[in-house]
Image (tube, rainbow, N blue to C red):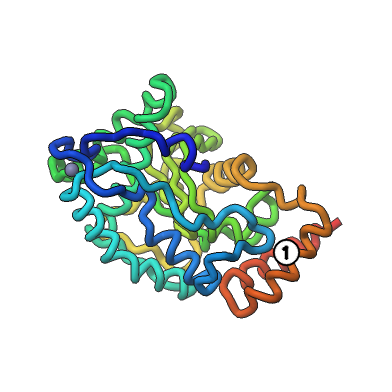
Amino acid sequence: MDMKDPFANLDIKDCQLCSKAPTGIDSHIVPRFISKTLIDVLIGGQHQLRFTGNPNSIQQDTLNIPFLCDECEKTLNKYETLFAPRYKKYLENDPYDLEIDEQTYRLLVSISWRTARLLLLTQPPKQAESLMAPEKAWREYLLKETEDVGPFHQYLFSARDFKETEIYASKRLSRTHLNTLIGTGVNGFYGETQTKQALVNHLGPLILCGQMRDIEEGSPAEAEQWSNFIVQPGSVIPGLPRNLPPAFVDGVDAHFEWALTRIDSMSKAQKQKQKKRADKHLKNTLAYRLIQEDERIFSSKEE
Ligand SMILES: [Zn+2]
């Protein structure tokens, strides 16, 4: 979702987290370090560039509006500052075990909370209804009024969990897209017996799902596929790929199909032009390596 346009004119006077103080300087909904680090690591800080096969998915900056008071902004900023170097390390190193300490966990909850709150302010009440309980649970946890988030778990997936076979069989997944998208949406994940609704935040190679509800509970086996991805303080995201719930793979694929520019809608001349630009500017970058990996995965699919 492009969050810029529909939300830019919101006039938010009071802190959305503590509601005790007026809003101060503008806050980022998705932390600024995410897009900044992505650009630095993926394309060597060449901010003016977009790259082939993925024309739209790196945003230079993310939505920035009055949202929090100075005190709450400072608290969330502290979590961000502590996590930013480890996020960078995770991007640079493959494989790399990512530890989720309490501050990082609070940061993840805050990202789910910020986006839930923003959607509550902007969506029609009927659509926003299922966000109300999770938003409250996440907010109370962030304010340290509760010990945990109750049933509204945070699930953290990685682009590295996607198998080549899953990408190959999908409609729209690619290594490039999976590693570079920043975006928010409410998504339904339709399993065989379970239907899960979650608030999804694509943070480059990390995909954060804030549990909203299970529309259908499903079998214990299907529930367990998901439970392996719940994060808590002390969790470790292993550097090696894990087995994803099939409903998650399908759900992300469906979201990409809706959100991304169709690569195959580009003309041959456009593709060649992009390729030339990439060869010239992106050699030796991580982005270039991802594009090459995609070319290899999909080479047998070319018409
Ligand atoms: Zn506040």
- Mark 1 within 8 Å of ligand 1, using the beta carbon: no
Q: In the image, ligand 1 is in what quadrant?
A: top left
Asked if 271 appears above or below 13 in the picture, the reply is below
Left or right, 112 with reference to 79: right
Residue that lies at the very extreme toward the top in this rendered image: 126
Left or right, 204 with reference to 115: right
Q: Quadrant of residue 69?
A: top left
Residue that lies at the very extreme toward the bottom in this rendered image: 284
Q: Position of residue 21 (x, y in %)?
A: 15, 39
Q: Residue at x 39, y 26 (%)?
A: 128
Question: In the rendered picture of this protein, how many numbered marks are placed on residues?
Answer: 1
Left or right, 38 with reference to 26: right
Q: Position of residue 167 (x, y in %)?
A: 64, 56
Q: Residue at x 51, y 55 (%)?
A: 59
Q: Position of residue 301 (x, y in %)?
A: 80, 58
- Residue in front for this viewpoint, 208 or 65: 65
The residue carrying mark 1 is 274
- Residue in front for this viewpoint, 297 or 36: 36
Considering the image in quadrants, where does the C terminus appear?
Answer: bottom right
Q: Secondary structure at mark 1?
A: helix
Q: Residue at x 47, y 64 (%)?
A: 38
Q: Quadrant of residue 120?
A: top left
Kind of residue at badge 1: Gln
Q: Position of residue 213 (x, y in %)?
A: 38, 32
Q: Residue at x 50, y 66 (%)?
A: 39
Q: Quadrant of residue 177?
A: bottom right
- Residue in front for this viewpoint, 233 or 179: 179
Asked if 116 appears above or below 253 in the picture, the reply is above
Residue count near mark 1 (Cα–Cα under 10 Å), binned few <14, some 14–19, many ≥20 = some
